[in-house]
Image (cartoon, rainbow, N blue to C red):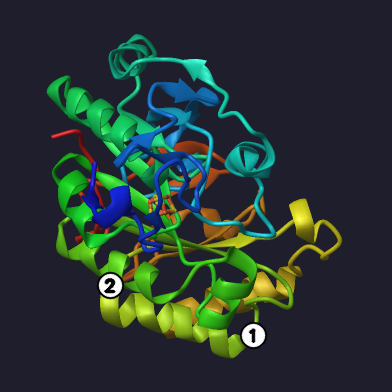
Amino acid sequence: MLYEKLDGEKVRCELCGHKCVIASGEYGLCRVRQNVAGRLRSLTYGLVVALNVDPIEKKPLFHYLPGTKSLSIAAPGCNFQCEFCQNWQISQSPRMDSHVRGQAVSPEQVVSGAIAHDCASISYTYTEPTVFFEMAYDTAVLAHRKHIGNVFVSNGYMSLKAIEMIAPYLDAINVDLKAFRDETYQRVMKARLEPVLTALRALVAAGVWVEVTTLVVPGMNDSPEELADIAGFIAKDLGRSVPWHVSRFHGDYKMADVRATPIETMALACRIGREAGLRFVYSGNLPGCADESTHCPNCHEMLIDRQGYSVRGIRLSDGLCPKCGEAIEGVWSRG
Ligand code: SF4
């Protein structure tokens, strides 16, 4: 899907912001799409490297069907090369291995699995769903026929064409906004900032429920100025009701020796988010922290009580705060 044929059996992939031009026999930057005699082929269709039943809170999505289960799948590969990747064994495997490996599974089997495990949604997650777009798309279409929702957990590098195609079937997405400096995106992620911002705006405009996550990495994106830039972008360009998840970093992959995010920095990030006008700011990877729960932005009543990934109580009444009647934005019922 989503490529253009060029002269001399070359193709241009239009799935993500890299827009790779690929000669016959060669691969795209993600290493899971290959030009085979002038046709672009997905090498991971029907292959998964992870298949689990997760709480939706784990994505994290806090304003989409809280307390429900989501069948979570991943194919190998990613269009980013983040030096701090927490799933690098499966996201980077096509770059480290000459073969793309995985367990064979069809879209029909994924949807049947979601039904069998009483999941309200299917999450395309752990790696980057954009680069297994065809598998995700076919599964998402089938899932909707069975009244099961679809969720992407993404780096937000999808092209506008890809967003237009998946939006009718995509109910919610959590996008990592990993920094607000293009230099950081180029150096650490091997990507660019602007396509992520463009995709975020387009997803909101398309009516997909959007939440944003920022992993706060010491020395990379943790200055008050950069955190304020991220929070300000969310508030002004996406909307104050878009939840912002500030996530604590622990050393991993090529940044294994970087210290964990100090608690004070996490608290500062949350404060900056609220000062920017965001109605919902959460801190993650900090179990037991009060910033895991949803409070009414108007009267501060506790509305969804969370601990870690578990929901201990939901006090919303038809999407409204039961105390003051404030409307709380989100997707609260399966419709
Ligand atoms: S999906 Fe892969 S092949 Fe296509 S543009 Fe992105 S990195 Fe390149």
The numbered mark, 2 or 1, whose residue comes first in the sequence reads 1
State the separation of the CA atoms marked 2 and 1.
22 Å
- Direction from residue 255 to residue 86 in the image, left or right: left
User: Residue shown at 86%/61% (left/top)?
Assistant: 257
- Direction from residue 4 to residue 298 in the image, left or right: right
Which image quarter: residue 108? top left
Callout count: 2
- Direction from residue 185 to residue 232 in the image, left or right: left
Amino acid on which the number 1 mark rests in the picture: Ser
Residue 149 visible from this viewpoint: yes
Dot 1: element: loop
Percent coordinates x, y for residue 109 in the rendering: 34, 12
Residue placed farthest to the front in the image? 8
Amino acid on which the number 2 mark rests in the picture: Leu
Percent coordinates x, y for residue 137 in the rendering: 25, 35
- Direction from residue 151 to residue 153 in the image, left or right: right
Dot 2: element: helix
Residue 278 visible from this viewpoint: no
* Quadrant that contains the N terminus: top left
- Tag on residue 223? 1
Residue placed farthest to the bottom in the image? 225
User: Residue shown at 55%/72% (left/top)?
Assistant: 185
Q: Is residue 130 above or below residue 283?
A: above
Observer-nearest of 238 and 42? 42
* Quadrant that contains the C terminus: top left
Disc 1 packing (10 Å; few <14; some 14–19; many ≥20) = some
Percent coordinates x, y for residue 207 in the rendering: 16, 56
- Tag on residue 238? 2
User: Residue shown at 40%/65% (left/top)?
Assistant: 280
Disc 2 packing (10 Å; few <14; some 14–19; many ≥20) = many
Which image quarter: residue 188? bottom right
